Amino acid sequence: MIKVGTDIVKISRLNDRFSKKILGLREMEIYNSLKTDQRKREFLAGRFAVKESFVKATGNKALNFKKINILIDKTGEPYPDADTKKMFKDYEISLSISHEKDYVIAIVILNMEVKL
């Protein structure tokens, strides 16, 4: 069974105060290391969009956003940390975040093998 969620966010909607509401500890470290306010807003919007995409894919509006940590590998590709993988242990997780001018879009694909 495959579940898909997607979300789009206007980057300018978000500010530093919002980061404390949705970013996990490891994400906050990345956020604080970013050099410009614009890059911080893009990062924050991307994380918000991907977390909203998890809500849409699972149908679970009670997900704790701070417990979902999406990190960045050496090539710049986002990936869920080990604790996030445990939260969604029944699924293989694929995700993508993309920025374009004023907007960020994210998609989450949760793939669960159904055994007959």
Image: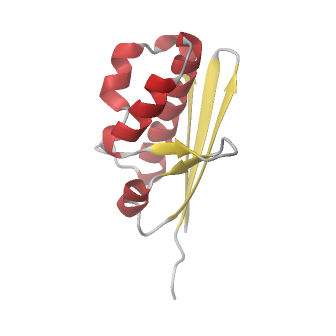
Query: Residue extending furthest bottom?
Result: 116
Which of 102 and 20 lies nearest the eye of the viewer? 20
Q: Quadrant of the N terminus?
A: bottom right
Where residue 104 appears, as percent x and y from the top left, is 61, 26
Quarter of the view holding residue 32:
top left
Query: Does any portion of residue 81 appear in the rendered image?
Result: yes
Name the side, left or right, on which 89 lies relative to 6.
Answer: left
Quarter of the view holding residue 92:
bottom right
Name the side, left or right, on which 115 lies relative to 64.
Answer: right
Query: Does any portion of residue 10 appear in the rendered image?
Result: no
Quarter of the view holding residue 76:
top right
Which of 53 and 40 lies nearest the eye of the viewer? 40
Relative to 90, say whether 99 is above or below.
above
Residue at the spot 52% in from the left edge and 19% down from the top edge: 40
Where residue 113 appears, as percent x and y from the top left, is 54, 76
Name the side, left or right, on which 52 lies relative to 105.
Answer: left
Residue at the spot 65% in from the left edge and 14% down from the top edge: 102
Residue at the spot 60% in from the left edge and 43% down from the top edge: 107
Relative to 30, say whether 73 is above or below.
below
Q: How many marks?
A: 0
Residue at the spot 35% in from the left edge and 49% down from the top edge: 60
